[in-house]
Image (spheres, rainbow, N blue to C red):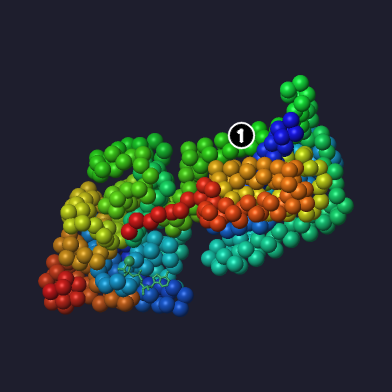
Amino acid sequence: MIFLDNLVNGISLGSIYAIIALGYTMVYGIAKMLNFAHGDVIMMGAYIAFCALQYWNLPPFLALVVAMLACTVMGVVIEGLAYRPLRQAASLAVLITAIGMSYLLQNLALMIWGANPKSFPSSMISIPTISLFGGQLKIAGATLVTILANIVIMVALTLFTSKTKTGKAMRCVSEDRGAASLMGINVNRTISITFAIGSALAAVAGILLCSSYPTLQPTTGSMPGIKAFTAAVFGGIGSIPGAMLGGLLLGVIEIFGKAYISTELGDAIVFAVLIIVLLVKPAGLLGKTVREKV
Amino acid sequence: MSEGKRTQPLLSVNDIHVYYGAIHAIKGVSFEVYQDEIVTLIGANGAGKSTTLNTITGLLRPKQGSITLKGENVTTLPSHKMISRGIALCPEGRRIFQQMTVRENLEMGGYTRQAGEIAASIEEMFTRFPRLKEREKQIAGTLSGGEQQMLAMARALMSKPNLLMLDEPSMGLAPILVEQIFSIIQELHGAGVTILLVEQNAQMALSVADRAYVLETGHITMEGKADELLHNDDVRRAYLGS
Ligand SMILES: Nc1ncnc2c1ncn2[C@@H]1O[C@H](COP(=O)(O)OP(=O)(O)OP(=O)(O)O)[C@@H](O)[C@H]1O
Ligand SMILES: [Mg+2]
């Protein structure tokens, strides 16, 4: 049953990567930029939930809502202040700004909460561990919630982009900004909404991450952020199902690599697989190669 | 349209200058379009025709000069607000949403309209362009070039524009489709849509238009009634190959 244990843990970790990767991929697909500060928004979300639970004594559901709202505002403000003025600038300038924003958030967290790691309260997800197969397979409450949250988010986002007017506007902006604005779509507003959604998801990811791995410090978001970005590229950046698939695969590969090959090399294995996939399929697993007709 | 000239123009472009970085693409272009006219802008490759249309819709900004719609200055209006002023552009290269279905493309064309009106307008488009009806659920990127052009026109019409601007609607189409596109343009005109047409196919454009402007490297070098330009020797030599 070790195998099943590992599989469940891999899917759980992969679900967290997937939710983070969704934020990367949506922003990349619509704003055409890599928001390297995304991982740090996750960390901020986790700290805010931590404060809500620990200092303000809010119930878990309200802590989630507060963290999501705060991250939404943070995402929209970051986009409006730092990225929007660079809309016509070279993509390298935007990338550097995003990296700067990432350090700004980490240092902000350092200033507010200090360098000492906080232990994320387990009261956030107080669902008991369930045992299957007569106790041979144990699934932690946090694991279960993570996997379910991932499924709900995936379904909701797919419906949102395929059925709602705003979701369709996002797809238009993603394909052709100029043509979208000719239709009457406000491109800036659409990009803001994308950041809002991505950042709200970042808060969820931060809470789920720290519920499974409770050490919270200013750099908590960095590694998961980079891995989720990898997952997004792995699945095909810009593609929502790709982020999901990439995230899940990455989580499973990481856990299995650590369990069966080498604990130290776990991360290296993840990136090695990424390189192999990109050599074979440069657009990622579900990435689209756009054809154009003359 | 001598009687038209006494009224206020629907669209007036006043001495605009447009740059791409250091490239001075439009060097003081002025022209007017009156309600119910078909006006055509002809000129060789790189003359600045697309730049002019993109500047009118706000996708590009003139460094100098102004654009007015029924007397209202719209020079700095964001491009997404033009459509609710009754202006639609069917852009060069069609620029349909390739990954969306035909129906979704049409829905996006009606983005600024009430949800309840869209289905009926889509039906109207299907009546006008029956090929689109057959391909309603197809991903637009898989349509043929001619079908994509039909879709681009239908999408622009979904906003029920008062002024429809078409940027080389006949480009790359077989002669029979070109005929069809031009007869649709005349039908639309008959239905009360004012049209600003940019074309390489000067022969066709001049034969449907009321008035025409000739654009050369960012300047207007000639203007007049379309049938007069059609018989003008300079125009014939430069644009009609005779
Ligand atoms: N994005 C751009 N960057 C730099 N220069 C540009 C850009 N777009 C157009 N130009 C230049 O501006 C001038 C006018 O271009 P424009 O596309 O308006 O011509 P056009 O009359 O539409 O030509 P065509 O008939 O080939 O479509 C050309 O010299 C072109 O090279
Ligand atoms: Mg052109």
**At 36% across and 39% down in the image, what residue appears?**
B137
Q: Position of residue A88 (x, y in %)?
A: 53, 65
Q: Amino acid at mark 1?
A: Val
The C terminus of chain A: image quadrant: bottom left
Q: Nearer the viewer, residue A25 or B190?
A: A25
The N terminus of chain A: image quadrant: top right
> Circle 1 sits on which residue?
A152
Tell me how many marks there are: 1
State the SS at label 1: helix
Q: Position of residue A275 (x, y in %)?
A: 61, 56
Q: Is residue A150 visible?
A: yes
Q: Position of residue B148 (x, y in %)?
A: 31, 51
**At 14% across and 69% down in the image, what residue appears?**
B230
Q: Quadrant of residue A2?
A: top right
Asked whether, in this view, residue A118 is left or right of residue B52, the answer is right
Label 1 lies in what chain?
A
Q: Position of residue B82 (x, y in %)?
A: 40, 56
Q: Nearer the viewer, residue A18 or B193?
A: A18
Asked whether, in this view, residue B176 is left or right of residue B45, the answer is left
- Above or below, comparing residue B119 to residue B39 in the picture: above
